Image: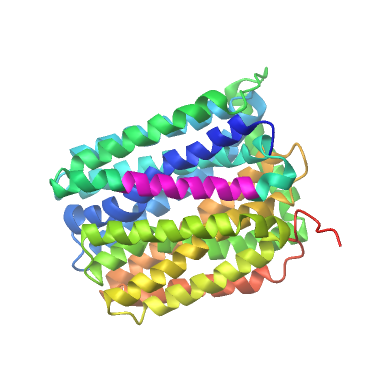
Amino acid sequence: MPRNLGQIISWCLFDFANSSYSAVIASVIFPVYFTTYIAGNEHGLGDLWWGRAISLSMAFVVITSPFLGGIADFSGIRKRFLILYTIICVTAVALLSILEKGMVIEGFLLITIANIGMEGGLVYYNSFLLDVAPREYQGRVSSWGYGVGYIGSIASLLLSIPLINKGLMNYVWIMVSGFFLLFSIPSFLYLPADKKKDMKIVKGAIEGFRFTLKGLKKIWSQQEVRKFLTAYLIYEDGVNTVIVFSSIFAATTLGFTNRELIALYILVQFTALLGAFIMARPIDYIGPKRIVSLSLILWFLVSFSAFFIYEKGLFWLIAIMAGLGLGTVQAGSRTFYSQFIPQGNETEYFGVYAMIGKSSAILGPLLFGYISSLTGSQRPAILVISIFFLLGLILLQTVKGGGPNIKVSS
């Protein structure tokens, strides 16, 4: 085991913390609450506004990442930015408790701000992976983070059930805010400290933008990295869109209740937890490319099959299949990309990775919301999203790399 086990645990606990937001606010309860109660989704209006909120927040993160990443690098305040973004997110989530029926614009603004806080913070969180985990453990630590995150998702949903049963929906958002903040504290305390530098913040932002452009050109000029990031851009768009709209699809198209949605999501998280831990060692020993490819095949089958499903029982089955591939495609992609990163360039490379990843959450949600509102049905929308997985899988096969991190001796 690595010697800095405390830092690894605190890094994983941040995934435990932010998964409360991912589960309750971004995936299961609040999306359905916003689209069906706050906005109304009879003609796809809720889908449209939800897609706009997710896309706008991701676009903001993409645009600002070069400047803020530069500040983190050149001014040496990466950890402070992680804390700042977390505070922004938990504050906006707590303010969701003021929403009432018909407050579409207010809800749109708050979820946009909350998602900026969540996704912006992940830029810095991901960059700590190479600081806390030796190379031979990166695949496993990455998977452990996602695995612990699934436990956090389950825990936050279980805590939501009594509040939902009593009709105290606004208290659910306050609970998530507190959960996120409380379990983020170990990472604030124990992750590697900031290294103060002389460069001022404004100058750091300008230099960061120049540095990012230079880094983007340098990274994009590397053929294999460019091919990987192109494939990642496409298939991650599918992943993000399915995550964002899966509960809305289940509630609107198949008639799932809140209790059924929570039970379904917990089951998916449990299978994702199994998948993440089972595939942790294979990522290092077999290689992330093969693992990600298998996951994308599974995701394509899941999203394509959803178009034809009219019964809740069958949807439960494909949801379990999706869970098995959820953690592995994310952990495997992060490990695959890490193999391209020269030592000392972690923030630069992960800044580009974040830009591509967040960009991949712009088109898909907008497209889903637009098709749903245009056709009055979510089925054509989910069918279009399945193409993202197939195309990403094909492009990934052209990438050289993604082999095992550990050579098995003969």
Name the residue: 27% across, 78% down.
311
Q: Is residue 86 above or below residue 319?
A: above
> How far across and down, in percent of the image, does residue 250 sit?
29, 67
* Residue 155 horizontal/vertical position (percent): 35, 45
- Left or right, 147 with respect to 376, comes to right
Q: Is residue 332 above or below residue 167?
A: below
Q: Position of residue 92 (x, y in %)?
A: 32, 36
Quadrant of res 256: bottom left
x and y, in percent, of residue 91 in the image? 33, 32
Residue closest to the far right: 410
Q: How is the image coloured?
A: rainbow
Q: Which residues are magenta?
A: 140-157
Q: Residue furthest bottom?
A: 308
Q: Is residue 143 magenta?
A: yes
State the predominant SS element of the stretch in magenta. Answer: helix
Using the image as rendered, state which of residue 221 and residue 329 is in the foreground.
329
**Left or right: where 66 falls relative to 398:** left
